[in-house]
Image (cartoon, rainbow, N blue to C red):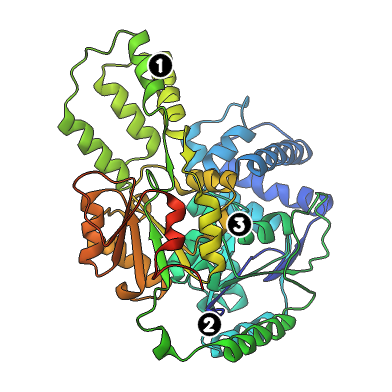
Amino acid sequence: MTIRAVFFDMGGTIETFGWTPELRLQETAGIRQRLESAGIHLGLTDQQLYVLISTGLDSYHQASLQTMAELPPQLVWNDIFAGHPVKQERLAAIAEDLMFFLETHWFRRALRPEVPGVLEAIHNMGLKIGLISNVNSRGQVPANLDLYGIQHYFDPIVLSSEYGRRKPDPAIFHYAARLANVPTSECLYVGDRISRDIVGARKAGFRLAVQIINNFDHGEEDDGTQPDAVITCMTELLDVLKVEMDQTKSTSLPSIQNQNKTRAILFDAGDILYFRPERGQKFQAFLNKFGLTDVKISLSKLNALKRKAFHGSISQDQHRQAILSLYGVNDPEKMRLGQQALEEDDNNIQFFNGVRETLIALKEGGYLLGVITDTAMPLHIKLRWFEDGGFVHVWDSIISSNELGIQKPEPEIYTAALQQLGVSAGQAIFIGHDADELQGAHTAGMKTIAFNFGERAKADFYINDFSDLLRIPFISPE
């Protein structure tokens, strides 16, 4: 394997940045003017407004470190100005503009002077170039890239403000790799923060994670894992890439030898990697408690809701609320308890015996590993399960119906995985339990293996234990 895509952090990496209390106090006048232009008069001095915003942003920052969720600017400003006479519709109308102003005026930003030349050199190597940035504004990063004259190099540009998750959540790294159509194991990431950039890239299975030194003191602990390389100037990245690509050339095999060889193994998630030992019991207890067990529910309506959730048309929370509404639940407290019961059922998973050890053995054997999952579950939650299971780093691709808006056995969802992994259908195997999904993979041209299967399931091979994958002739690692 080699590097096919290079992703960069923005602040502290593409550009250096820093700030002082004096700078921020001075620029607070611009925030006050924008608030007043929108008819929001807080009656605060610039000093008082500066303290209010600083305290609120620090609180949001500390919370985001724990949740890794990026909230829309309106919600951030709502929390900052909580307790003050602010009309929500007026604040909503300027929330993004306020955040854009803050992120462009509360920091001193400057492009590293060597970056344009480095980007041109990477482009000339034929590598894809992308960007993953934690930022609450949607406009600041594109505006600065345009200001620096380098925006045309980056595709994709992934912002936490748009995706809704922040580094080091591996979900945002997987999302970026999927948009670039490159396996995570063929990606390199460059960032200045170990705790966000290096840790996140490692969890997502990126081949290399490189730290570039930014001398601004964040006042935070920054540890978690060792980067593959530490550089002080972006030109040093070219040396890292050259070494990596030279090693790949010296060890690569003629492509004809790999044309018919299994290179990728794709897994369904639920009832293949994990199962729910007490499926639905919390929700059943909720129904029993409130006398709802005899309520007749339309199966067609339930399936329609499930399809919407699996296709990402409604969120998982909306899906749970809609299910409870079908049972006639409208009391806020009952709705909360019902949603809690559904969530606990969803999160009560147990991995099949041998999953971690088998996946790691397959990864070490050189296989590309992927997941194709039909789910209403946000990707970051499944990745958290995988992290708890000790194998979050093994995945080269995770294709979720919730993100793509299609589900198995539609051929496009299998094709999406094959394209990201860069393999043909004849070089891939799908492991599943559902008869229709196995047939979909077979129709797509893949070999199939059935595990935890029912009577209707038809596949090329059948296994009773997950670790039996290591004993199948065309999979067994050499």
Q: Which mark sits nearer the N-terminus, 3 or 1?
A: 3
Helix, strand or loop status at disc 1 = helix
Q: Which mark is residue 31?
A: none
* Contact between labelled residues 1 and 2, with CB atoms less than 8 Å apart: no
Residue 38: tell me if it is visible: no
Helix, strand or loop status at disc 2 = loop
Would residue 9 appear left or right of 437 to someone viewing this image?
Answer: right
Q: Which of pointers 2 and 1 indicates the residue nearer the eye?
A: 2
Check disc 1 and give the amino acid type. Pro
In-front residue for pair 327/219: 327
Classify the position of the N terminus by image quarter: bottom right
- Tell me if mark 1 has few (under 14), some (14-19) or many (20+) residues whose alpha carbon lies within 10 angstroms of its own: few
Residues at marks 3 and 1, CA–CA distance in whole angstroms: 38 Å
User: In the image, is residue 337 above or below residue 52?
Assistant: above
Residues at marks 2 and 1, CA–CA distance in whole angstroms: 52 Å
Residue beneath disc 2: 127
Helix, strand or loop status at disc 3 = helix
Q: Which mark sits nearer the N-terminus, 2 or 1?
A: 2
Check disc 2 and give the amino acid type. Leu
Residue 143: tell me if it is visible: yes
Q: Which mark sits nearer the N-terminus, 2 or 3?
A: 2
Name the residue located 39 percent from the left edge and 61 percent from the top edge.
Answer: 266
Residue beneath disc 3: 203
User: In the image, is residue 446 above or below residue 439?
Assistant: below
In-front residue for pair 147/280: 280
